[in-house]
Amino acid sequence: MTDSGEPTLHELGEFGMIDRLVSGRRQPAGVSVGPGDDAAVVSTPDGRIVVSTDMLVEGRHFRLDWSAPHDVGRKAIAQNAADIESMGARCSSFVVGFGAPPDTAVPRVQELSDGMWQEASALGAGIVGGDLVASPQWVVSVTALGDLGGRAPVLRSGARAGSVVAVAGELGRSAAGYLLWHRGIKGFDELRRWHLVPRPPYGQGIAAAQAGALAMTDVSDGLLADLGHIAEASGVAIDLAADALAPDVDAVSAAAAAAGVEPLALVLAGGEDHALVACFPGAVPAGWRVIGTVADGAPEVLVGGRPWTGPAGWQSFD
C-alpha cells in the first residue's frame, strides 16, 4: 500500500488494474468489440484505416513534477489525434500501451486513463484496448486509428508552386511554456498550461481536405522542421512571411523576454503545439490563416526570402 492507503500496481495486478480502467466506459458506435478480449473490433466505413503511433517517455516528453497524470493522458491522445487530423481524417479509436514502476499508486494510473478518455471522448472516439507492463519509468504508447470518410488522404508530397501555406491553430505557445517550466519562471500560467496539454484544432484537418488542401502536416517538431518535410516530399521551396506570424510572436513575446530568447525562434522552431499547416491552391477555409507561399526551387524553407539561421526544431535523439 502507498502512504495514502491506496493499492499499488503490484498489489492490484495487471488484470485488476485493467478491469478498473475499463469499468463504466462507453465506446462509440463504431466499436463492436472493445477491451476484454484478445483484440478489439472496429468498423471501417471507408474501407481504409488511417493509423499513427507515438510514444511519451517520462523525463523526455513529460515530467510528473510538472504534469498531473490527467494532463499526460490528454497530451498522449492529443498528439496522436493531430497526426490523424493532418491526413484529413477523423479519429475513430485509440489503443494504449502503458508501462510504470510496480509501486505506482493505482489512483495515478486512473487519473492518466481519465485524461485519455476526456480527450478521446471530445473527438467522438474511444480507447478500445492496449497493454499494461512494468517499466523503470512511465512510458505511454498510443496508436490512433482514423477514418477518411471517402476522401483521399492529404499527404506531405502534394504541394506545388503557386499554392499558399496556411496554419490552423497557434504556434510557439508550447515552446514558450516549456522554457518557463524549465527555467523556473513563474507567472504566464496560460503558456505554462499550454505546454502540458496541447490544443490541436480538431476538425480543421477535415475542413482542409474538403477545401482541396494539397499537402498537410501537424506542427510537432517545429514549423520550420515540419514544413521542411513538405518541401522535401513535394520538391518545392516554401517562403514564410514573418509579418504573418506576428500574432504568434506577440503572444509569446513577454515570456520570451523573461526567458531571454527571441520570440520568433519559439514560433518557427518550437514544437508540440500540434497546429496544422497545409498548402492550398487558392482560398483557405475558415479557421486558417495564410503565412507563406510555395515556389519552384530546391527544397527548403525560407523566412522572408532568406534562410533561417536560428534553431530549426526538435530532434528525437539530441
Image (cartoon, grey):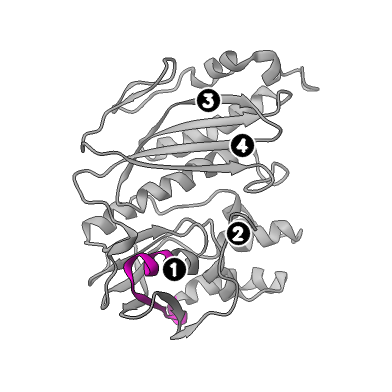
Start-end of magenta stretch: 228-244
Determine which quarter of the picture holds residue 69: top right
> How many circles with numbers are drawn on the protein?
4
Q: Reading the chain from its start, which is encountered first: label 1 or label 2? A: 2
Mark seen at residue 191:
2
The type of residue carrying mark 2 is Leu
Count neighbours of disc 3 (C-alpha within 10 A) and say few if under 14, some if 14 to 19, many if 20 or more: few
* Quarter containing the N terminus: top right
Q: CA distance from mark 3 to mark 1?
A: 35 Å
The residue at which mark 4 appears reads as 139
The type of residue carrying mark 1 is Gly
Q: Does residue 196 appear in this view?
A: yes
The residue at which mark 3 appears reads as 131
* Quarter containing the C terminus: bottom right
The residue sitting at 60% across, 17% down in the picture is 14
The residue at which mark 1 appears reads as 228
Please, what secondary structure does the residue beneath circle 4 have?
A: strand
